[in-house]
Image (spheres, grey):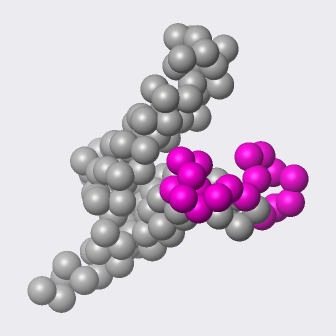
């Protein structure tokens, strides 16, 4: 029974990586391209703090979706979310339900988990590792 469950854990990890990457990519698309129109915070200046954050979200989100350079991408994304929480959310209140930092905390720990666990199934990293 447990071997059957463990056989699915790699696929579940991959699904978590892909969904988290898609959501992270979506945040980057808003900041870099202003799409969809009306989404907050909207298009940002590329060399601003939010613009650089958007570029990081765009690149790491895409890498996570593909499962390419998964561990470094997840580590960078996790760090960005830790910085985002402490710089932008925590100063207004120490309580995530009040300061709106719930998502930043979840992203931080999801990406930290992906960094430690690896890409799971369905990744370019796994395909290239088998060739060498």
Magenta span: chief secondary structure: loop
Q: Position of residue 25 (x, y in %)?
A: 59, 61
117 vs 8, left or right, is left
Could you tell me how many numbered marks the image carries?
0
Q: Position of residue 40 (x, y in %)?
A: 77, 46
46 in magenta = yes
Q: Nearer the viewer, residue 85 or 132?
A: 85
Q: Nearer the viewer, residue 41 or 130?
A: 41
Residue drawn at point x = 35 percent, y = 78 percent: 124
Image quadrant containing the C terminus: bottom left
Q: Quadrant of residue 88?
A: top right
List the single residue furthest toward the bottom: 131
Q: Is residue 9 visible?
A: no
Q: Position of residue 59 (x, y in %)?
A: 48, 67
105 vs 132, left or right, is right
Q: Quadrant of residue 102?
A: top right
Magenta residues, start to end: 35-52
Q: Quadrant of residue 63?
A: bottom left
List the single residue furthest toward the top: 94
Q: Nearer the viewer, residue 90 or 106?
A: 90
Residue drawn at point x = 25 percent, y = 83 percent: 128
Residue drawn at point x = 76 percent, y = 62 percent: 34
Give the answer, above or below, for where 106 lies relative to 115.
above
1 in magenta = no
């Amino acid at each position: 029974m447990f071997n059957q469950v463990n056989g699915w854990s790699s696929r579940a990890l991959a699904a978590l990586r892909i969904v988290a990457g898609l959501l992270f990519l979506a945040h980057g698309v808003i900041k870099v391209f202003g799409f969809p129109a009306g989404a907050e915070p909207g298009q940002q200046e590329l060399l601003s703090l939010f613009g650089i954050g958007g570029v990081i979200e765009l690149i790491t989100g895409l890498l996570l979706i593909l499962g390419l350079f998964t561990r470094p991408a997840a580590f960078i994304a996790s760090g960005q979310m830790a910085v985002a929480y402490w710089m932008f959310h925590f100063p207004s209140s120490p309580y995530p339900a009040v300061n709106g930092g719930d998502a930043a905390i979840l992203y931080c720990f999801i990406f930290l988990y992906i960094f430690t666990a690896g890409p799971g199934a369905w990744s370019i990293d796994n395909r290239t590792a088998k060739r060498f």
